[in-house]
Image (tube, coloured by chain):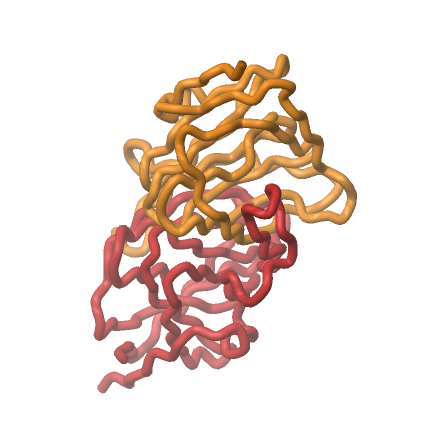
Chain colours: A red, B orange
Amino acid sequence: MSQTIRIQPLTTEAFAPYGDVLKCDGVPDKIINGGMCGRFHDLAIVDVEDGRAGISLFQSKLRQLPYTLELVERHPIGSQAFIPMSMEPFLVIVADADMTPHAFITAPGEGINFHKGTWHGVLTPLSGTGLFAVVDRICDTPNLEEHLYATPYVVTT
Amino acid sequence: MSQTIRIQPLTTEAFAPYGDVLKCDGVPDKIINGGMCGRFHDLAIVDVEDGRAGISLFQSKLRQLPYTLELVERHPIGSQAFIPMSMEPFLVIVADADMTPHAFITAPGEGINFHKGTWHGVLTPLSGTGLFAVVDRICDTPNLEEHLYATPYVVTT
């Protein structure tokens, strides 16, 4: 029998144990370009060991709710940021050290950065184009661990 | 009297002297997530000296065409990527070593990465939300040079 986990709104506070929320929160840190642009500065802990930070694009198929969570993964020596390239919310799943999962939904215009070693679900866009920029560790040596749940979770609103 | 520069479509080849085009071009480098996602891997030369690469958000006001180009800037010790967070094209302006400017328009879903030291215009979204993720050098020491044109250029289609 599967267990159900409920989707919560993504907040900086609730997500803090797992990573960073990339959003324009409050007043910009700096106004640039002759007053035409606000810079919200240095929002993510980009932390890669034994390699370098790079930019890739992920083109994902869309997922539906209820979503069946069968596995989580983690990158033990590198953070990973998911930056949506369309103004659509997406589902973000993380897990504690004891593998208890939690599900969050972003607001439009928000990205996330998983801290190094955070257990997380794969990219799960629910609508839009499924196109994301990803900032993570670039190196040929291994940086992936997977955990398969004996009993899947059902993720729903 | 101002000079006019015409906007060209952004192509990897035309942009190569200035930076990288971040787009899903052809077949993914890797299929991940059980076949649900294509990874277009390591598309940008992220190159920062005397600091680290970080992620910021830029919330820009929109610009209109014809656009008056009065200055270009460069970051002598760091690359800078502009990743649109909405599916809208944006204007990308660069300049050669002799300061001759060139203007490109992206296709929806494309970002760019200016190589370290490339002269470029400020962020110039023409439509959409004006929200971008920016991957550039994070450090308190200086990394900005500006060049003001004696006679502005008019950028138009």
Q: Residue furthest front?
A: B1
Give the position of the C terminus of chain A as an image quadrant: bottom left
Give the position of the N terminus of chain A as an image quadrant: bottom left
Q: Is residue A13 above or below residue A71?
A: below
Left or right relative to A136: residue B38: left
Quadrant position of residue B122: top right
Q: Position of residue A146 (x, y in %)?
A: 41, 64
Q: Position of residue A7 (x, y in %)?
A: 34, 78
Q: Is residue A89 above or below residue B117?
A: below
Q: Position of residue B30 (x, y in %)?
A: 35, 42
Q: Nearer the viewer, residue A113 or B136?
A: B136
Q: Residue furthest right?
A: B141
Q: How many marks?
A: 0
> Looking at the image, which residue is at 30% across and 71% down?
A70
Left or right relative to A114: residue B8: left
Quadrant position of residue A125: bottom left
Q: Nearer the viewer, residue B116 or A58?
A: B116
Left or right relative to A136: residue B150: right
> Looking at the image, which residue is at 40% across and 32% down?
B65
Residue A51 visible in rendering? no
> Looking at the image, which residue is at 72% across and 37% down?
B143
> Looking at the image, which residue is at 51% across and 61% down?
A24
Q: Position of residue B64 (x, y in %)?
A: 41, 36
Q: Is residue B39 above or below residue A113?
A: above
Residue A98 visible in rendering? yes
